Image (tube, coloured by chain):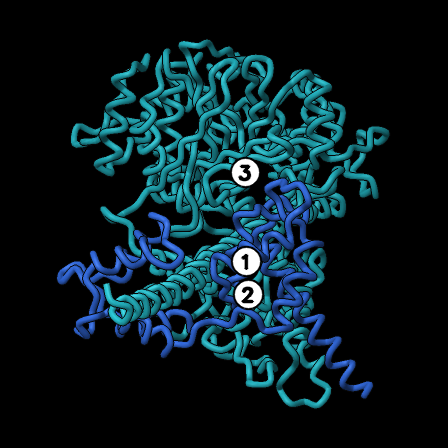
Amino acid sequence: MGCSSSSTENKKSEKVVKAALVIQNWYRGYRARLKARQHYALTIFQSIEYADEQGQMQLSNFFTFMLENFTPSRKEDPALVSRLFETTFQDIKDRRDYVGLIDVPDSYEGPRLEFPLTFTDIGQLLEAFKQQQILHAHYVLGVLFETRKLLKQMPNFTHVKTSPSKEITVCGDLHGKLDDLFLIFYKNGLPSGNNPYVFNGDFVDRGSNSIEVLMILLVSFLVYPNDLHLNRGNHEDFMMNMRYGFTREILNKYKLHGKKILQILEEVYTLLPIGTIIDNEILVIHGGISESTDLNLLHRLERSKMRSVLMPPVSINKDNATDLKKSKMGITLTAPGRVRSSDLSSEQLSKHEWEQIVDILWSDPRGRKGCYPNTSRGGGCYFGPDVTSKVLNKYQLKMLIRSHECKHDGYEICHDGKVITIFSASNYYEEGSNRGAYIRLGCGMNPRFFQYRVTSSTCMSPLHHRVHAMENSAIRILKERIISRKTDLMHAFQLRDHSRSGKISIAQWAFSMESILGLNLPWRSLSSRLVNIDKSGNVDYMSSFQDVHIEKPVKEVHSTLIETLYRYRSDLQIIFNVIDSDHSGMISMEEFRTMWKLFRTHYSVDIDDSQVDALANTMDLNKDGSIDFNEFLKAFYVVHKYEKLSTSEAS
Amino acid sequence: MAEDKDREELALAEFHKKIKEAFEVFDHESNNTVDVREIGTIIRSLGCCPSEGELHDLLAEVEEEEPTGYIRYEKFLPVMTKVLQERRYRPIPEDVLLRAFEVLDFAKRGFLTKEELVKFMTEEGEPFSQEEMEEMLSAAIDPESNSINYKEYITMMVIDEN
C-alpha cells in the first residue's frame, strides 16, 4: 500500500487507458469511413439505376415521335410502327387448344402440376426450384392461362380485411431473386387461408430466376385466390422486360415455346390489379401517388388497356377517317385489317387515365413539399408529405405502403409515419448492399417489420470485404458510364483547361462530371477512386478514362460511333426487340436502316448513316440481308483493364 | 492580397461542397436533415477522428434546443466548416496506433489474445458496444491462433483505406 507502488500502478493503468482510447478512436473512425463508402456505393447504384429508367422513358418519346412523323402504308411502314399501333391482343386461343398442343415428354423429370391446383402443387414447385429444375412450358402456359381467366374477374383494387387472428404480410420488390422468396416463406410460412400475403409488384427482371418467382406467385394465387394478392409493378411490362432481362431469360430457358409464353404474359400483366386496400385504411401500391391521384377513376378504368409505360395513348385525327394523312396531331389509319380510328379511341385509355396509372407505378416520396416530375426516372412524380396527407385524407385512408425503391435496411418510413417503403430483394445491387424486409399487419396493431439477408456463405464475411466488393462493383459500372461519354467529357475538361496542362481543379472536374453524366453523386468523395490527383489537389483529367475502354468490333471504325452505339445500347435493344415481333433475333437490313435513321434524328446523334451501314456490313453478321441484332449489340462492350477476360464481356 | 482572399474563398467553397456531399449521402428524404445517429459517421467520413466524448460535445452544438432526433444541414454546416478549417480531431498516425497496441501487449509477444483484446476494448477507455467488438474481431482475429497479430492487422487496414 506504499505510495510508490500505487503510483506506478496508476501510471500503468493510465497508460493502458490511453492506449485503449487510441485504438478505439482509430477503429471507430475506420468503421465510420467503411460505412460511408458503403453508402457511396449504394448511391452510385441507385443513381445509375434511375438514370437508366429515365433513358427508358425517353424511349417512349421516341416511339411517340415515330408515330407522329410517320405515314403508314401497307408496304413501307416498318414493323415497329405496326407493332406500336397494335391495340388488341393477338387472338390467343382457348387454353385447351393452345396448351394441349404442347406435349410433356416422358423423359421430363421436372415438376408436374395438376389442374385444378392445390397446395401440394406449391410444395412440389418449391422443391423442384430448390433443385434448380425448370418447369415445362406446358405447365407455364397452363398456369398463365388459368391466371388470365381468374384475373379477368377481379377488380382493379383488391379489398382485404384483417382480424386479430389473421394478420397479413406485405412484401416488396423481388426482382427474380428466388432465394429471397424462399427465405420469406421459411421465416414467415407458406401462403394459406390463415397466412395471407400481398406481393407489391416487380416480381421479375434483373434477377436470374424471374420465371420461377413468377410461377410460384401465380400458382399460389391460383390455389389461394382470396389470400394471395398481387399488385402490378412497373416491371410487369413487356417492354421493360426487354431491357431488364426477363425476356432474355424466357427465351433462353424456353427455346421452343418462349414466344408463346411472352405473348400471353404480356396480357396477364395488364390484368394484374393496380393495388390492394387493407381494412379500408391502408393503400398498397407499387410506386406512389401524385397530387391528382383519383382513386375513383382508378377503380373504374379498364386496366387491361395499359399495355406498357412506353406506349402512351396515340392521339387520333377523327375528321379524316378514310384518308392516309400525315398530321401534326397524329396519324390516321385506314389500312384494312388495322383498327379504324373510330375504334382506336375505345381500344386505348385516355391520356389522363394512362398518366394516373403511370403515377401509381413510378412515383417516389420525397421530403420536399409539393408534387414534381420525377426527373430521375423520367416518369411519375416526386410527392411530398403534404401530397400524402391530402390524398390519404381525401379517401379516408391512414397509410400508404409502397415499394419501388431499394432501401439499405429493407424498409423505410417517411412522411410522418404515413408512408412505408418495403423492399424484399436483399443484396439487390451487390452482395452486402442492402437487407430485404416484409411487414406483418393486423387490424389495429402497429406494423411489424422483419428483415433478412440472403448470404451464400454460412457466416458473413467481415465488413471491409463486403464494402470492398460492393464498392468495386459500383465503381465498375460508374466507369462504364464515364467511358460511354468520353467525347463529351473530354470537351468539357478541355474547355476548362486554359493552360492546356492536362489538369483542372477538383471543383471543375466535379462540375464537369455532374453536368455531363447527369448523375448527382458525391464526386469529391469518390474522386480518389476515379482519377489521379496531384499534391496540390489538381486532377489529371485524362486519368478519368484509364483502365477502361470500349472494345472496337472492327479496327477501322471511328471511336465516336463506337461510343454512341455503346451508350444507346439498351435503347437499341428494346427497339430491335419490338421490331422483331416474332422473336427470331433477326431483323432485315432494311428495317435496321430505317430505324437507325429515325433514331438518329430523334436523339440528335451526329453520325452518318453510311457509317452505321458500313459497320453492320463489315461485321458481317449475316449475309442474307438480315442482321442478328443481339450479336450486333454484344459487340460493343467495355473492357476493364485489370479484370480477367471472362468477366469483361458485355452482360 | 486579393489573390489570397480569392484562394481563401475557393478553399471555403471546397470545404462547403465536401461537407454537403458527405451530408447528402445520409439525407434519405432529401430534406436537408439526417438522423442524429448518423452524425458520427458523417464527421468521421470527412477524415476527422473525434473521441466519443468530443463527438458528444459536437452534437450539442448542432442539435436543436429541443432535440428532435434529426440534425439540420443549416446547423451542421458552420460547425463542421470550423472543424475542418481548424484541422481539429486529426486522425491517429500509424506509429501511434502501433505503440498503443504494444502498450497493451505486456509480455511483448507481438500479438494479443482474443480475450485480452475484448477485455481492453470493452472495459477500458470509451468501451466498445457489442456490435463494434464483434465487427473488429471478425476482421482482426486469426481463427487458428485466436489472437491478433497487431502489426499485420494495422498494415492491412492502412492498405485497405488507401
Do labels 2 and 1 touch, CB within 8 Å?
yes
* Furthest-right residue in this view: A319
User: Quick one: A364 or B79, which is closer to the camera?
Assistant: B79
Colour of chain A in the rendered structure image = cyan
- Check disc 2 and report the residue beneath it: B46
Can you say whether B135 is above or below A547 in the image?
A: above
- Check disc 1 and report the residue beneath it: B42
Task: Locate residue B66: give its quadrant.
Answer: top right
Q: Position of residue A228 (x, y in %)?
A: 42, 18
Q: Position of residue B15 (x, y in %)?
A: 66, 69
> Is residue A129 toward the left or the right of residue A280 in the image?
left
Q: Chain of mark 2?
A: B
Q: Which is more foreground, mark 2 or mark 3?
A: 2
- Residue drawn at the location 58% of the way across and 82% of the way down: A540
Circle 1 Cα neighbour tier, 10 Å, few/some/many (<14 / 14–19 / ≥20) = many
User: Quick one: A557 or A192, which is closer to the camera?
Assistant: A192
Do labels 3 and 1 touch, CB within 8 Å?
no
Q: Secondary structure at mark 2?
A: loop
Q: Which is more foreground, mark 3 or mark 1?
A: 1
- Residue drawn at the location 83% of the way across and 43% of the way down: A328
Q: Position of residue A127 (x, y in %)?
A: 23, 29
Q: Chain of mark 3?
A: A
- Check disc 3 and report the residue beneath it: A404
Q: Is residue A346 visible?
A: yes
Q: Between marks 2 and 3, how big is the CA–CA gap?
A: 31 Å
Q: Position of residue A209 (x, y in %)?
A: 35, 39
Can you say whether A556 is above or below B62 in the image?
A: below
User: Quick one: A497 or B144, which is closer to the camera?
Assistant: B144
Which chain wears blue?
A: B
Q: Amino acid at mark 3?
A: His
